[in-house]
Amino acid sequence: MSTAADGGFEDPPAEVLVEAAAAFGLLATPARLHIVWALSQGESDVTGLADRVGGTLPSVSQHLTKLKLAGLVRSRREGRRQVYLVDDPDVVAVVRLMIGQLAERAGHMPAHPVRLHELGA
């Protein structure tokens, strides 16, 4: 991003702000954030994600559909399975940075993965 004449950063165009707000809005639920966190560490099918995050198959599938429509994750067919992954390294970096910073402020990373039902999702 370029800098303004006064040495500060120029404001991004309105359409960029709208797109960023939409992406952050999709990640604003603990369930979807957990799914993206899990996928940032490696690809998985819906069953593996549901086991990892503690959600039901239909719930995790719905979240994946929304994330996929927004372009935050993608899928590929592997035999009879649909395998999901985060295809955008920038999204992975933002999620890891935010969660890492918050965990560091709290003084630790969780000893066990947090499950969706523990978050009230």
Image (cartoon, grey):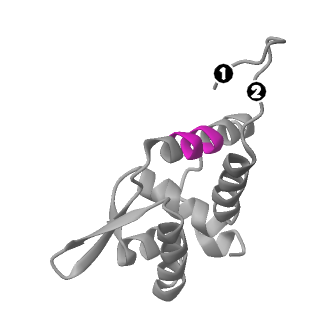
Query: Which residues are the magenta region?
Result: 93-99
User: Which amino acid does the dot numbered 2 rest on?
Assistant: Glu
List the single residue furthest toward the left: 79
Query: Is 22 a magenta residue?
Result: no
List the single residue furthest toward the bottom: 58
Query: Is 95 a magenta residue?
Result: yes
* Residue 79 image offset from top left, x and y in percent: 15, 77
Residue 60 placement, left or right of 85:
right
The residue shown at (63%, 57%) is 23
* Residue 113 image offset from top left, x and y in percent: 53, 59
Marked residue nearer the N-terminal end (1 or 2): 1
List the residue tagged with mark 2. 10
The residue shown at (70%, 68%) is 119
The residue shown at (68%, 60%) is 22
Q: Quadrant of the C terminus?
A: bottom right
Vertically, is 43 above or below 102?
below
List the residue tagged with mark 1. 2
